[in-house]
Amino acid sequence: MAAIAGPEETTGPRPGDDSDVPAPRLTVIGTGYLGATHAICMADLGFDVLGVDVDESKIKRLNEGEVPFFEPGLPELLAKAMDSGRLRFTTSFEEAAEFGDVHFICVGTPQQEGSDAADLRYVDSAVTALAQHLCRRTLVVGKSTVPVGTAARLTELVQRLAPAGDQVELAWNPEFLREGYAVDDTLRPDRLVFGVSSAWAEERLRAAFAPIVATGTPVVVTDLTTAELVKVAANSFLATKISYINAMAEVCEATGGDVRGLAEALAYDDRIGGRFLKPGLGFGGGCLPKDIRAFAHRAEELGVGQAVAFLREVDAINKRRRSRTVDLVRELAGVTGGDLTGVRVAALGAAFKPNSDDIRDAPALDVASALHRLGAHVTVVDPQATENARRVHPELDYGTDAISAAIDADVVVLLTEWAQFQEIDPEIMGSVVAHRRIVDGRDALDAARWRAVGWEYRALGRP
Ligand code: UDX
């Protein structure tokens, strides 16, 4: 297809750099947790940024200065970016193509219904919608987590659809941000990974991240395939570490050992390290569970399923922690057999982890709804995720705070370790419950403090 030349770049000096090479104008396609954070942070770094989404209501809220989800520090940064005039949001791909020199694809890749594979329809439709309007030399950068091989397929797609043809290049730049720390992880990442097919693409990416590169952040430049794999390899490693300690918790449960002491002793070994070695209810969220499943699925498709077969076990261990937590509630309630009818449970937490309102594959909600299915009367309380939880689980009751949710409870179960739950005074909570019984699903409470005032305390992997 004929290449159409156009102005390479359009605006002022490159942020974070003294050179007079103009800074690329950036678009960020998809304004969920990843995209909105990326757009806002890039504008904060001094770039001109256009955020794009097909969801008109989301775009309206963002243009009005409202972050559509809970993320500490992000609303303040959005306000600053909007005031600077460097950030705006649109639903028009035509406008995006006209505006941007570097386009970041940040749409979701959820698990496909009825399969472990990733659902690539949002990535495909974003790339298709953008490509049709790309009339000059530009770089399209994938940030979404995708099955290996996607970037090669998208390169062909984008060059076939774009009026500028092979003047449009594709790069992959995986994102490692954690919800709850998204701003910090974006502005001060551990590393940047640039998967590129040309020196030009690398130069464009270096320009697009100039202020971060200038702070000495390590940059790993590699090919597209390796960049795709880095993300799933990192998430698989983290998931494996969590399931490893939770597998040790299972052994502790069978032997009378204490997984908390075990984890602490392991953590002193620098080669092992203590991060992501926290036992409990296990991992959830929009990334780790679906990423390990999609990775295993893709590896099987490629004939190397055996190499990552252990990820199936990692997933199974993780799921068992949820049913074990339900069992602990049952044991504490003194119920033999399945039926929990008449048992009142206060469930502390709904979000998949603290400092987030995200309930995707949330272990907390999984446990709460399992208890409900067994007949318990469950009241859920969460500082941020109640609205999202209610939408998906309208059958559960929702409280406004931990103490009122615990009134007359037969069992209290801690499911998400929000700071305010860890700070609960066991005496105060003890004065409202029907029975002083607590299951610490996140191994986050001081057992001695609770037991000292008469609570029966149970935790996963602990005596
Ligand atoms: C994760 C990765 O950390 C991030 O790099 C990637 O880009 C996206 O996926 P996130 O899903 O935001 O980030 O949450 P993370 O902090 O990794 O926690 C994932 C889950 O693991 C949570 O449910 C958390 O409660 C659980 N977890 C974490 C444990 O059970 N034990 C631990 O020691 C650590």
Image (cartoon, rainbow, N blue to C red):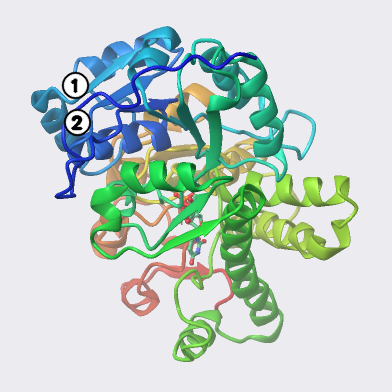
Distance from Cα at disc 1 to Cα at disc 2? 6 Å
Q: Quadrant of the N terminus?
A: top right
Residue at image point 33% right, 49% down: 186
Residue 431 in sight from this viewpoint: no
The disc, 1 or 2, on the residue closer to the chain's N-terminal end is 1
Are dots 1 and 2 in contact, CB under 8 Å?
yes
Q: Which mark is drawn over residue 386?
A: none
Residue at image point 44% right, 90% down: 268
Residue at image point 40% right, 67% down: 444
- Could you say whether the residue bearing mark 2 is in a helix, strand or loop? helix
Q: Which residue is mark 1?
A: 65
Residue 223 in picture, x, y percent from top left: 61, 52
Decide if residue 433 is on the left or right side of residue 88.
right
Q: Is residue 417 above or below residue 77?
A: below
Q: Which residue is mark 2?
A: 78
Residue at image point 75% right, 38% down: 117
Q: Is residue 271 above or below residue 117?
A: below
The foreground one among 9 and 286 is 9
The foreground one among 390 and 399 is 390
- Could you say whether the residue bearing mark 1 is in a helix, strand or loop? loop
Residue 275 in sight from this viewpoint: yes
Decide if residue 217 is on the left or right side of residue 372.
left
User: Quick one: which residue is furthest to the right in this view?
Assistant: 303
Amino acid type shown at disc 1: Gly
Amino acid type shown at disc 2: Leu
Decide if residue 381 is on the left or right side of residue 461.
left
User: Quick one: which residue is furthest to the left in this view?
Assistant: 83
